[in-house]
Amino acid sequence: MTSMSVEVERKSVLETRENAVTKKGKAKASSGGAGSVLRGIMKTGIISWLILLGIWQLASMFNPPEFLPSPLKTLEGLKELFDSGALLQDIGISLQRVAIGWGRGILIAIPIGLLIGAFKPVRMLVEPLINFFRFVPAIGFLTLFLMWFGVGEASKTVLITYASIFPIIINTVAAVGAIDRTRYQAAESLGASRWQRFIHVTVPGSMPGMFTGVRIGLSAAIIAIVGAEMLAADSGLGYLIFTSRLYYRTDWIFVGIVILGILGFVADRLLRLLAKVLFKHYGITE
């Protein structure tokens, strides 16, 4: 075999290998692109919702609509309530009650949680009461709140405040306890007073746990308002769910439940986005 034929054969082998590597790379890129698209779709939760809707539709086919309405029947009920104007009114009233009670709970719970976590005398004085009342459900105080604050809005917003403060307090106290002690030592070595350490170390360091408590407090507030509106209101989503049984309108009940879930989901996403933008430097990234 001449040197020229050897060179030709070598080039042929190299070209074959290069073609194989190129095809493999293209196939991998194509597979990776499809995989990333699939992961993106799954991240949005669309597949989970489609599976749930499929199970719901399948189950409704074997039950009367008075027992389990189909997704389409629920949509028809949604349109009916929307056209009447009652649905938007109930949503607005429930959101207003939750916003007032939950906001008040944040203003009360965060300072208490910070003080309990940072100062031992305060913890010894207040923590036993917190650990007692946090196991008493908010709905258990509804009758008392109605007697003390009347049947108007005050009793409902106070009930929501009561329900939302304990998750915020507990998470704030835990966040303060989880702060690295070396941060306090560093501040002390720089001559910071106890109050300065509280402002510049305790408060910023507990922000992520505090935010988690605020999110959990929001869910507790929504749960509380549904119970309050079921038992002591003439408006709101809880009232809609409770009174729909009188008309055997199971589809309206499902409308109320779905809307509560959507409102909570959207509110939580907006809260996370707001915190990510405003408090990113405190370690809140999602």
Image: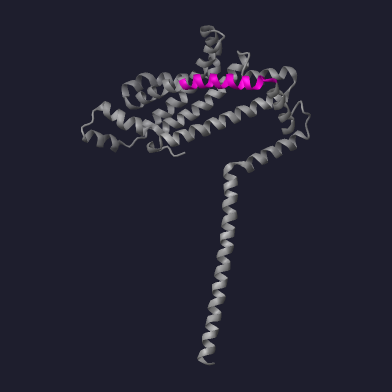
> For the point 46% across and 19% down, which residue is it?
104
Say which quadrant the N terminus sits in.
Answer: bottom right
Q: How many marks?
A: 0
| Image location of residue 286, percent across then percent down | 47, 38
**Residue 106 is drawn in which quadrant?**
top left
- Indicate left or right for 267 with 188 as reference: right
Would you place residue 24 above or below residue 98 in this image? below
| Image location of residue 255, percent across then percent down | 67, 27
- Indicate left or right for 280 with 54 as reference: left
| Image location of residue 274, percent across then percent down | 46, 33
| Image location of residue 227, percent across then percent down | 59, 19
| Magenta-drawn stretch contains 136 | no
Would you place residue 40 above or below residue 173 in this image? below
Looking at the rendering, the stretch of residues picked out in magenta corresponds to 84-103
Colouring method of the image: one colour
| Magenta-drawn stretch contains 98 | yes
Magenta stretch, main secondary structure class? helix
> For the point 67% across and 41% down, which residue is it?
51
The residue at the far bottom in this view is 2
Would you place residue 56 above or below residue 235 in this image? below
- Indicate left or right for 155 with 173 as reference: right
Nearer-the-camera pick, 107 or 113: 107
> For the point 64% across and 29% down, which residue is it?
258
